[in-house]
Image (cartoon, grey):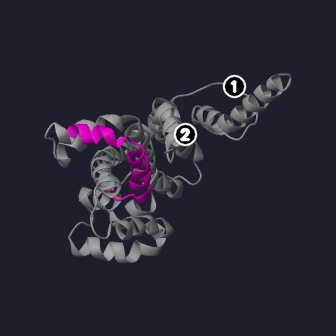
Amino acid sequence: MRSIPGRAALAYLAALVTVAPLLWLLFSAFRPASELYDPGWPSELTLSNVAYVLTEVPFLRYLANSAFVAVTVTVIALFLHSMAAYALARLSFRGRGFAFASVVATLLISLPVILVPLFIVVRGLGLVDTYAGLIVPGLFNAFGIFLLRQFYLGVPKELEEAAHLDGCGHWRIYWHVILPLSRPMLAALAVLFFLANWNSFLWPLAVAQDESLRVVQVGIASLQGQYASKQHYVIAAAMLAAIPTVLVFLLGQRWLVASLKTTGLR
C-alpha cells in the first residue's frame, strides 16, 4: 500500500508530460508574435492570431471538409465493417479462413506502397478532385474488421439460436441482436476512425488539388510554406485543428478503453 502514492505521483507526472505539448500549443496560439518563443508566461494574450486564420485564410472550409470526410467515412465504414466481421465470425462458407487471412494481411501494407496504383485506379474512375475520391479509399480498414470479428466471437451463440427459433434470418439477427450488443465496440472504433481520417494527410494531398477540397492537415502544410516567417499563424491553425480531436477522444475514451480490455477475451 505504501507504493500507491508513488505510483499516483508517477501517473500524474506522466500525464503532465503528455499534456504539456498541448498546453504549450494552446498558449502559443494566443501569444503575440514577438513573444512566440519566449519560455515564460506571455505579457498579454491576443486573439489576433486565431482571428487572422479564421478570416484571412479559408480555414473554416478546411475544417468543414475534414469534418465531412471523417464523419462520412466513419459512419459508412462502421456499417460495412460490422457486416463483414459478422460474416467472418458467424457464417460458415467456403474460403472464410482465407478471406479473413487476406483481410489481416492488408495490415502489412502501408499507404505509401499502394499510393501510386491507388491513385491510378481513382483517376480511372474519375474521382480525382471529388469528395468521393477522398472518402471511398478510406472506407476499408482491416483493423476495424479484425476487432469486430474478435468481439463477435465472444457473443454467446445461444442468443442467435434463440433468434433463429423466433424465425429470424441472418439479417435480422445482425440488425436486432448483434449491432445492439456491439455498441461499445462501435463507439470505440468510431473514435479511432474519426481521428485517423481527421489527421490524414498523404492521400488527401495526392487526390485533391482543388483548394475547395483541401482538408485541414493539408491546409496547415500549405500555411507552413506560405507563412514560414509567421509561425504564430501556423500554430493558431494547428490549435484549431487539434480541438476536435481532443474533444472526440475525451468523449469516447471510456468506450475505447473498454473495447481494448474486452477484445480477444473468449
Residue type at numbered disc 1: Ser
Q: Nearer the viewer, residue 4 or 237?
A: 4
Residue denoted by label 2: 261
Q: Residue 67's x, y, as percent? A: 35, 43
Q: What element does badge 1 sit on? A: loop
Confirm whether residue 214 shows in the render.
Answer: yes
Residue at 41%, 35% (x, y): give it: 184
Q: Is residue 44 left or right of residue 68?
A: right
Q: Residue 259's x, y, as percent? A: 48, 39
Q: What element does badge 2 sit on? A: helix
Asked whether 123 falls inside the magenta stretch, the response is no
CA distance separating discs 1 and 2: 46 Å
Residues drawn in magenta: 139-163
Residue at 23%, 76% (x, y): give it: 124
Asked whether 146 falls inside the magenta stretch, the response is yes
Q: Which mark is residue 231?
A: none
Confirm whether residue 243 shows in the render.
Answer: no
- Residue at far left of view: 167
58 in relation to 132, above or below: above
Q: Which mark is residue 43?
A: 1
Q: Nearer the viewer, residue 148 or 156?
A: 156
Q: Nearer the viewer, residue 24 or 236?
A: 24
Q: Nearer the viewer, mark 1 or mark 2?
A: 2
Q: Is residue 246 left or right of residue 66?
A: right
Residue type at numbered disc 2: Lys
Marker count (numbered)? 2
**CB contact under 8 Å: marks 1 and 2:** no
Name the quadrant containing residue 157.
top left
Residue at 81%, 22% (x, y): give it: 5
Q: Residue 14's x, y, as percent? A: 73, 36
